[in-house]
Image (spheres, rainbow, N blue to C red):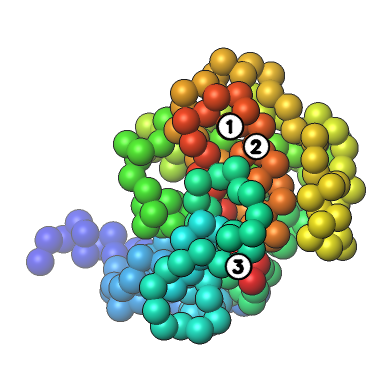
């Protein structure tokens, strides 16, 4: 046996025994042994094992087929092929396709709330890792020219101190060499939070809220727009409309979570 990795493993294990990791979502202390490899056999677990306890990790499930081929909505009936949902058959969507890591409920919803409202930005590490998982499930890095995060209004940005959409993609965009633009698209008009609005009200509320500083940066680009949550899709659809109008070749959407 090689002495150095063995000692390193022993050291890590002792450290974990004295200072067990604390789950970023539920705040409980848990046992995690990085060297054993028994936990973390699948990729989702691997991404989150350092940050979430086992029971929180169990609540994280990626969205799988069948889902809407346009907006990514997972179908309640779990058999059959992907196809367009009724809304996507009726309504104009400016994005080409939207995909998400998981459904916006349970632990994933809680984790996003802790990141956004509890301002625990360390969560952007595991949650960003999950966004990256979803990215590679549905795209490859050669198929996208530019990552654009859905912007916050400057008033909201000051209040929160960070843009969660940007935090979720910043690290891996750099690692994968995909240009990331968090400045060209801006939220020029203040809008009331969409949370308590119905679908049609959301669409009206968000219309005309975004503008482009340098439209020439968008022209001809294959764009992936990123956000934390896809609720009714009104926000990303409005962003996609503005980006398409400026000459983007296409706009796809990646979100960490998808409301159903
Ligand atoms: Zn937990
Ligand atoms: Zn759909």
Percent coordinates x, y for residue 26 in the rendering: 65, 74
Q: Which residue is mark 1?
A: 244
Q: Quadrant of residue 112?
A: bottom right
Q: Residue at x 46, y 83 (%)?
A: 78
Callout 1–callout 2 Cβ contact below 8 Å: yes
Is residue 56 visible to us here?
yes
In this figure, what is the number of numbered marks? 3
The quarter of the picture where the N terminus appears is bottom left
* Residue 233 position (above or below residue 226): below
The answer to whether the beta carbon of the residue marked 2 is less than 8 Å from any atom of ligand 2 is no
The answer to whether the beta carbon of the residue marked 3 is less than 8 Å from any atom of ligand 2 is yes
Callout 3–callout 2 Cβ contact below 8 Å: no
The answer to whether the beta carbon of the residue marked 1 is less than 8 Å from any atom of ligand 2 is no
Q: Which residue is mark 3?
A: 86
Q: CA distance from mark 1 to mark 2?
A: 5 Å
**Sequence-earlier tag: 1 or 3:** 3
Q: Residue at x 86, y 60 (%)?
A: 197
**Sequence-earlier tag: 3 or 2:** 3
Q: Which residue is mark 2?
A: 241
Q: CA distance from mark 3 to mark 2?
A: 21 Å
Is residue 20 visible to us here?
no
């Amino acid at each position: 046996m090689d002495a150095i990795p063995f000692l390193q493993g022993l050291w890590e294990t002792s450290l974990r025994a004295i200072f067990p990791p604390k789950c970023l979502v539920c705040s409980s202390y848990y046992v995690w042994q990085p060297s054993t490899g028994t936990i973390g056999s699948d990729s989702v677990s691997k991404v989150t094992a350092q940050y979430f306890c086992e029971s929180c990790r169990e609540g994280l499930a990626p969205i799988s087929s069948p889902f809407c081929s346009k907006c990514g909505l997972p179908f309640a009936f779990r058999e059959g092929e992907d196809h367009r949902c009724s809304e996507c058959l009726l309504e104009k969507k400016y994005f080409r396709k939207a995909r998400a890591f998981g459904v916006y409920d349970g632990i994933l919803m809680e984790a996003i709330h802790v990141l956004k409202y509890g301002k625990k930005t360390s969560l952007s590490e595991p949650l960003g890792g999950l966004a990256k998982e979803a990215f590679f499930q549905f795209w490859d890095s050669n198929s996208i020219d530019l990552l654009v995060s859905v912007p916050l209004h400057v008033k909201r940005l000051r209040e929160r101190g960070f843009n969660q959409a940007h935090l979720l993609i910043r690290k891996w965009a750099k690692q994968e060499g995909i240009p990331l633009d968090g400045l060209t698209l801006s939220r020029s008009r203040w809008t009331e939070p969409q949370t308590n609005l119905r679908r049609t009200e959301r669409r009206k509320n968000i219309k005309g809220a975004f503008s482009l500083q340098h439209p020439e940066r968008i022209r001809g680009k294959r764009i992936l727009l990123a956000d934390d949550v896809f609720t009714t899709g009104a926000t990303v659809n409005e962003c996609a409309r503005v980006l398409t109008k400026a000459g983007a070749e296409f706009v796809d959407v990646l979100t960490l979570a998808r409301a159903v």
